[in-house]
Image: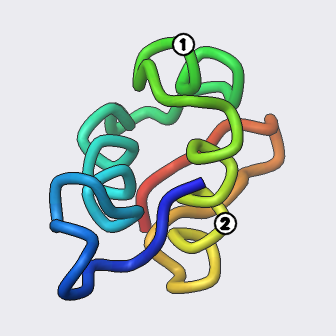
C-alpha cells in the first residue's frame, strides 16, 4: 500500500500519483469499476485506496448505473 508524499516517499510512488492515474482514465460518459481497474493497471489495494480518496474529495461519484463519473 502506498502513502502520501513525504521526505521518504516521492510523489511518483505515492497514492496521489495513483489518484491522478485513476482520474485520467475516467471518460466523460463514465466507466465501470472493473473496467477502470483494468484500464488503470494499478495494484488492487492501491486502486481501491485511490478511488476511496477521490470519492471522499467528491472528485468522482457513482451514478445509478454503477458507473464512476467525474464530478
Residue found farthest to the front: 8
Q: Earlier in the sequence, mark 1 or mark 2?
A: 1
Q: Which mark is residue 62?
A: none
- Distance between mark 1 and mark 2 Cα atoms: 17 Å
Question: Image quarter for residue 28?
Answer: top left
Task: Note whether 64 is above or below 14 in the view shown.
Answer: above
Q: Residue at x 68, y 32 (%)?
A: 44
Q: In the shown orientation, is residue 54 left or right of residue 63? A: left
User: Which percent across, then down, holds residue 1?
Assistant: 60, 54
**Tag count in the figure?**
2
Q: Label 2's element? A: helix
Residue ID at (71%, 54%): 62
Q: Is residue 47 above or below residue 61?
A: above
The percent coordinates of residue 66 (x first, y second) are 80, 38
Disc 1 vs disc 2: Cβ atoms closer than 8 Å? no
How is the model colour-coded?
Answer: rainbow
Q: Residues within 10 Å of mark 2 (few under 14, many from 20)?
A: some
* Residue at x-position 49% and y-position 59%: 2
Residue nearer the viewer, 3 or 56: 3
Pointer 2: what residue? 52
Q: Is residue 13 left or right of residue 3?
A: left
Residue under numbered circle 1: 38
Quarter in which the C terminus is drawn: bottom left
Residue 71 versus residue 25 in the image, above or below: below
Which of these two is toward me, 34 or 70? Answer: 34
Secondary structure of the residue carrying numbered label 1: helix
In the image, residue 56 above or below residue 52: below
Q: Position of residue 35 (x, y in %)?
A: 59, 15
Left or right: residue 36 versus residue 20 is right
Where is residue 65? Give x, y as percent.
80, 35
Amino acid at each position: 500500500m502506498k502513502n502520501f508524499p513525504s521526505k521518504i516517499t516521492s510523489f511518483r510512488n505515492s497514492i496521489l500519483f495513483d489518484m491522478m492515474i485513476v482520474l485520467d482514465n475516467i471518460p466523460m460518459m463514465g466507466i465501470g469499476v472493473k473496467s477502470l481497474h483494468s484500464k488503470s493497471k494499478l495494484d488492487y489495494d492501491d486502486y481501491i485506496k485511490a478511488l476511496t480518496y477521490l470519492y471522499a474529495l467528491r472528485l468522482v461519484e457513482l451514478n445509478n448505473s454503477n458507473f464512476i463519473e467525474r464530478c
